[in-house]
Image: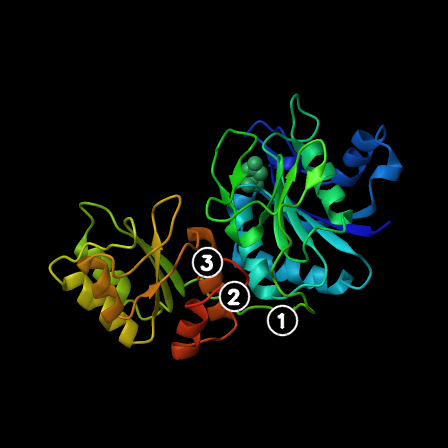
Amino acid sequence: MPRVLMLYTGGTIGMQPSPQGYIPCAGLAERLAAHLALADPYRLPAFDVLEMQPLIDSAELMPETWNRLVAVLETHWQAYDAFVVLHGTDTMAYSAAALSFVLGALNKPVIFTGSQIPLGEPRSDALNSVVSALQLAAHPATPCEVSLAFHDRLLRGNRARKMRTQGLDAFDSPNFPWLAELGIGISFPQPSALLSGKPNFAPIEVDDEAVAVLPLHPGMSLRRAKALLADKTLKGLVLYSYGVGNPLSFEGELLDALKAASERGVALLNVTQCAQGEVVQGAYATGAALNQAGVIAGSDITLEAAIAKLTVLIGQGLLGATLRKALSAPMRGECSR
Ligand code: ASN
């Protein structure tokens, strides 16, 4: 039977109530063991639990945590066959995407999971998440990639989104089929097409000034958008646009500001605000102008994966044309083209 290492980073799954609301709590391994005492030990792989320090509500997560996770994975990579990361749901899609980009090709599965209701509370989904992730970790068909197991599904990590604040089926991947469906049995509709290989464990250089998002909306301030684009610390920007990737042009002024930023070396990635579908820059004249301004069409990448991809690539020291090239094509199956 494979051996699994479970990294507990915090999140609702291990939280307990306090007068201020739920807070992350240590000692999850013992509590899990008590809950799993009745489970048939022959149906689950052997696993160890490692608690990260500090345990956090994942809303507090900063990219430094990704480096800490990668360092722990590197230390234990040889000793285990698969890895489960227990993570808060708020930023789990960002972390799963970021780790997929940092680690690159994998020869073992890394499965993120969490829960909407803490372990031990009535109707908690925590035990289901842990048991599902463990079974997937031991399953020979589980792909060697960073994935996210939640409720009844296994999703590609860099395609996943938190879609529901309340629902127990909180995650989905609207632009990509599920990797596996967990019903009475576990079915894998198609084998993963991602190449496997030895992971890269090099930490990224964290620069919290480097990446920003510019959401477009009726009534937005051109002055504020220009100020952001002119910011000298900016290295990568997600242009969060309408429909198939259309911007509002402010009679060419926003386009000029985008062009100037691109010429300064800022990487501009166009991501649609639509929950499903892809950017087609050029379907409309408004969108076609973005090609001239040096904006990269983000295909069907999610906002979370776009932010993670920019943060990781910039943190790996990519600049200018090399950065733009890396952003223009899928790295780890995060977009369709
Ligand atoms: N705030 C929590 C977190 O992301 C939410 C959760 O895990 N369900 O850590």
| First in sequence: mark 2 vs mark 3 | 2
Residue displayed at 48% across by 62% down:
309
The quadrant of the image that shows the C terminus is bottom left
The structure's colour scheme is rainbow
Q: Earlier in the sequence, mark 2 or mark 1?
A: 1
**What residue would you read off at disc 1?**
202
Residue 246 point in image, percent of width and height: 25, 54
Residue positioned 42% across, 74% down in the render: 325
Q: Amino acid at mark 2?
A: Met
Q: Amino acid at mark 1?
A: Ala
Query: The residue tagged with tag 2: helix, strand or loop?
Result: loop
Residue 151: where, in percent of width, then height?
A: 62, 34
Answer with mark 3 or mark 1, whichever residue precedes in sequence. Answer: 1
Q: Amino acid at mark 3?
A: Ser
Q: Is residue 44 visible?
A: yes
Q: CA distance from mark 2 to mark 1?
A: 17 Å
Q: Which mark is residue 336?
A: 3
Residue at the front extreme? 190
Q: Residue 334, image x and y in percent?
A: 50, 57
Residue 335 on image: x %, y %: 46, 58
